[in-house]
Image (cartoon, rainbow, N blue to C red):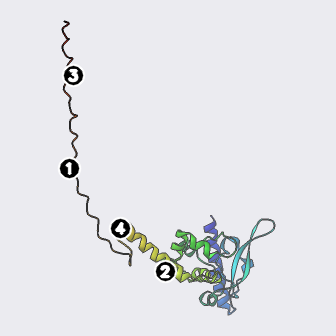
Amino acid sequence: MASTLAAAFAILVALAVTTHSARGAAPRLSCEELPPDVCAFAVSSGGLRCVLERTPEGAHRCQTSAVAAGAAAAAAGGWVETDACVRACGADRAALGLPVASAAAEDRRAIRALCSPACRDGCPNVVDLYATVAAAEGMSLPALCEAQKNSGIRRMMMGGGMAPVGAPMMAPAAAPVASPPVVASAPCEEPPVVAPPPCDEW
């Protein structure tokens, strides 16, 4: 239901943009006018990112953040991210505030989705957002993706019995030579004790 509403809203936004463009007016998209289910990963007409926030009453609302979108997203101006990109990048549209890059880096599935070709090559707006928050946290998204890729290669090599590149090569250990079985010798038999014949009395 929510994805149907989001798709319907995205179509309405696209129609509104087309109508404004046809009239010669610049399209305007304000974060505060977006419904909560399409707020995250959207970019206002002013090039600022939209974030989902909670009101004091506990409801969700869309707000304009102080974080500027990257050049590609800002050039689009008034951008609502597609559900396909949110899924491809493993993002959560219901998350409050901006994403935390360090949390994504610690979650193997999240970083794998974010660094996947479908996300990296097809969803520049989402990648730009994560790269921006990663840089603010003192990290580099390309470096995180490279580390994730290298650890995946290492896991494949280790799982397949191959040593990782640079690991010392060791000759296989020789199979131990089996010693002949030790046969226990039969216990020594002592001759039976024979009582001496009784002495004849004189």
Q: Amino acid at mark 4?
A: Gly
3 or 4: tag closer to the N-terminus: 4
Q: Amino acid at mark 3?
A: Val
3 or 2: tag closer to the N-terminus: 2
On the question of residue 122 being in view, the answer is no
Q: Are marks 3 and 1 in contact (CB under 8 Å)?
A: no
Q: Alpha carbon of mark 1 to alpha carbon of mark 2: how far?
A: 55 Å
Q: Nearer the viewer, residue 18 or 95?
A: 95
Q: Nearer the viewer, residue 177 or 171?
A: 177
Q: Alpha carbon of mark 1 to alpha carbon of mark 4: how far?
A: 36 Å
Q: Which residue is mark 1?
A: 180
Q: Amino acid at mark 2?
A: Glu
Q: Alpha carbon of mark 3 to alpha carbon of mark 2: how far?
A: 87 Å
* Between marks 3 and 4 in the image, the one whose residue lies nearer the viewer: 3
Q: Position of residue 174 (x, y in %)?
A: 26, 63
Within 10 Å of disc 1 (Cα), the crowding (few <14, some 14-19, many 20+) is: few
Q: Alpha carbon of mark 2 to alpha carbon of mark 4: how far?
A: 21 Å
